[in-house]
Image (cartoon, rainbow, N blue to C red):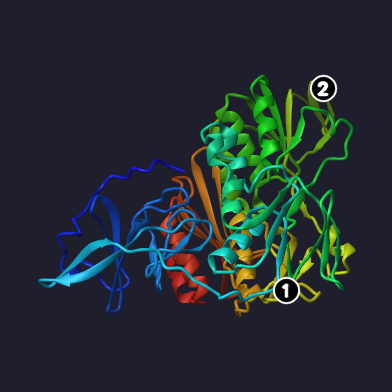
Amino acid sequence: MSGDTQELTGPDLALGVEPEAVPDGGMLVGHAHGEAVVLARRGADVFAVGAKCTHYGAPLGDGIVVGDELRCPWHHAAFSLRTGAAIRAPALEPVACFDVSTRGGKLVVTGRRGPLTVKLGGGGPSSVVIVGAGAAGSACAETLRRSGYARPLTLVGAEATPPVDRPNLSKDYLAGTAPEEWMTLRDEDFFKRNGVQLHLGTRVTRIDTANQRVHLEGVGEREYGALVLATGAQPSRLTIPGADLPHVFTLRTLADSRAIVARAATARRAVVVGASFIGLEVAASLRARGLDVHVVAPEQVPLARVLGDAVGAMVRKVHEEHGVTFHLGTVPATIDATGVTLASGQRLEADLVVVGVGVRPDVALAEGAGLTVERGIVVDEQLRASAKGVWAVGDVARWPDPRTGQMVRIEHWVVAERMGQIAARSILGGNPRCDIVPFFWSAHHGVTVNYVGHAESWDRVDIAGSLDARDAAIAYRKGERTLAVATVGRDHAALEAERAMEQGDEKALRALVPA
């Protein structure tokens, strides 16, 4: 997402450094042969990889080493230290990988290493059909091909565009700071080169699990050996008078964001209905475009249900400092061509209305096929649905969370991508468990909130640092367990919290955020 150039800092690793400069489990940032390089050690093994994350260009030297992985400080992508491979979303591309040798008692980076490839020798199911070309479906298709799966692979998307960077639809793209060319994750040519039959703007109308067939509208039937449902979720809509007027929008697709941008070009006043993450990000983006923005929501504190009162109040304050006006404890009653009338009787002038009041999982296909559906498609720890040869991933799937022992459905973009990767490995005969520690980030006028874990409720909230200074880590706890950690201005702490949750290390979580 950023430029290809990177400032070269630190020692010239091609000339060598003392072994003591790279502690076990630690890193040293330098450069070699004109490229920024991270040198990392795990026991007796020393690795060298590129220093820039291939997702948004974050400095990997600010991340952490976990096992044989190097993790990005911004959005928690993971790269293999041994091969440079992008092994965990949201990164798609590998980082460069370099050879390291010992010369004259020093560690020396000698040059780039060629990429390693995996071949299955024609194994796996007879064919794979993936329904849904969003984050989860695209990640599943790409992981299948990267893992060496060579049999027929079909990706079907109801949207007319290839997979896009959905988080940016409400963030930088809507704000006007991310160009259109950043938005497509993979273009149609990528899928063609990798032998993926791509059907965009195409709906699957029926699934026959008994005969393992799907019916594509306007295309015909396709037989599958494995079927992946990645149908995602649809935005909830208002049912009040005027909700279907042409200046009223929801935001889920690139087409939605384009339409809001086009309307914002001539609008002066906007009303955002809903103080959700999407709603507030839209508010920030429209303010960046110079619109007068009002947010209407029934709760008294924005985001309190997810982040608690203290963090929600901080987020509200950030928005108010940038000119957003809140109308809380009320809802819209009617919308007309020039404004929104609230249940309280107050009228807000508006020539643009954006509705961000949540989403609902798109389970119609699954219900029609007789799959088990309960607030989402029910899957097991390998993301297999109730019919043979069927998997479900992303926003539509409800899966057993090993940390809480509960069935959960989580609407996070990074989680969707990681579920797609796990399903691909399961399809190929592996035995992966969906033991993801959920992660998401939300941006508000330059203030980013990172969140790891999952807490539907909690007994108390502990805060380390200062929310007023936008420098804090916040723990959400029930009994003696830390269920989730949010951070503001503490990217490294978010990574450490994620690692501690993966390892079940409550002591480390208490050290990050004391009770």
| Residue 431 % position (x, y) | 61, 80
Let me know if residue 412 appears in the view. no
Q: Nearer the viewer, residue 444 or 511?
A: 444
Q: Which residue is mark 2?
A: 337
* Residue 351 lies in quadrant: top right
In this view, the mark in front (2 or 1): 1
* Residue 329 lies in quadrant: top right
Q: Nearer the viewer, residue 308 or 432?
A: 432
- Per the image, label 2 sits on a secondary structure element best described as loop
Tag 2: Cα neighbours inside 10 Å, few (<14), some, or many (≥20)?
A: some
Q: Nearer the viewer, residue 304 or 71?
A: 71
Residue furthest left as drawn: 104
| Residue 407 % position (x, y) | 72, 71
Does residue 59 appear left or right of residue 287 in this picture?
left
Q: CA distance from mark 2 to mark 1?
A: 47 Å
Let me know if residue 393 appears in the view. yes
| Residue 177 % position (x, y) | 51, 33
Residue drawn 51% across the image and 56% down it = 92
Does residue 418 appear left or right of residue 393 in this picture?
left
Tag 1: Cα neighbours inside 10 Å, few (<14), some, or many (≥20)?
A: many
Residue drawn 40% across the image and 72% down it = 68
Q: How many numbered tags mark residues here? A: 2
Amino acid on which disc 1 is placed: Arg
Q: Which mark is residue 22?
A: none
Does residue 331 appear left or right of residue 34 in this picture?
right
Q: Earlier in the sequence, mark 2 or mark 1?
A: 2
Residue drawn 56% across the image and 76% down it = 121
Q: Which residue is mark 1?
A: 384
Residue drawn 84% across the image and 70% down it = 209
Amino acid on which disc 2 is placed: Ala
| Residue 39 % position (x, y) | 28, 64
Q: Nearer the viewer, residue 506 or 385?
A: 385
